[in-house]
Amino acid sequence: MRKIEHIGIAVSNLEVSNLLFEKIFGVPPYKQEEVISEGVKTSFFMNGPNKIELLEATSSESPIAKFLEKKGEGIHHIAFEVENIVSEIERLKKEGFIVLNETPKRGADNKLVSFLHPKGTNGVLIELCQEIN
């Protein structure tokens, strides 16, 4: 793993949360998009070399909706940049981690993504992400 790529924060209202984080960082989000397959709308903020992703559910069946129902707003996941997501998934499976989606899928911000189950990572949902070339 190369670095922390971003920290994902589940929010109830993206518009309200965008205004809050604009005040915190002093800049608007650099990117907003909807990932229909995941049932989310996202906004990305830069803070120096660090990225924050805000996630709002667009469907009651969305993983974000379920997270908000159980835990409320807050940190949802930590994403790590990887060079080769397929080989990293295989390596982590051999280490005994539960991979939620063994076939990487298209995520926000032009990334292929896969997730490690939080039961095996001290309760933290880990996202692996690789830039799509």
Image (cartoon, rainbow, N blue to C red):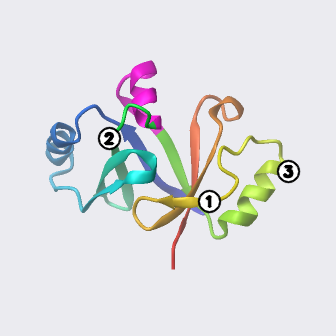
Dot 1: element:
loop
Give the magenta part as a residue range.
63-76
Q: Residue at x 17, y 39 (%)?
A: 20
Q: Earlier in the sequence, mark 2 or mark 3?
A: 2
Quarter where residue 30 is shown:
bottom left
Q: Which residue is mark 1?
A: 104
In percent of width and height, residue 131 lies at: 51, 70
| Nearer to us in this view, 121 or 112 | 112
Q: Earlier in the sequence, mark 2 or mark 1?
A: 2
What amino acid type should be assigned to the residue bearing mark 2? Thr
Cβ atoms at labels 2 and 3 below 8 Å apart: no
| Nearer to us in this view, 23 or 41 | 41
Dot 2: element:
loop
Q: Which residue is mark 3?
A: 94
Work out whether 64 lies above or below 39: above
* 3D distance between C-alphas at marks 2 and 3: 35 Å
In percent of width and height, residue 106 lies at: 51, 62
What amino acid type should be assigned to the residue bearing mark 3? Lys
Dot 3: element:
helix
Main secondary structure found in the magenta portion: helix
Q: Which residue is mark 2?
A: 58
* 3D distance between C-alphas at marks 3 and 1: 17 Å
Residue count near mark 1 (Cα–Cα under 10 Å), binned few <14, some 14–19, many ≥20: some
Q: Residue at x 42, y 35 (%)?
A: 64
Q: How many marks?
A: 3
Quarter where residue 46 is shown:
bottom left
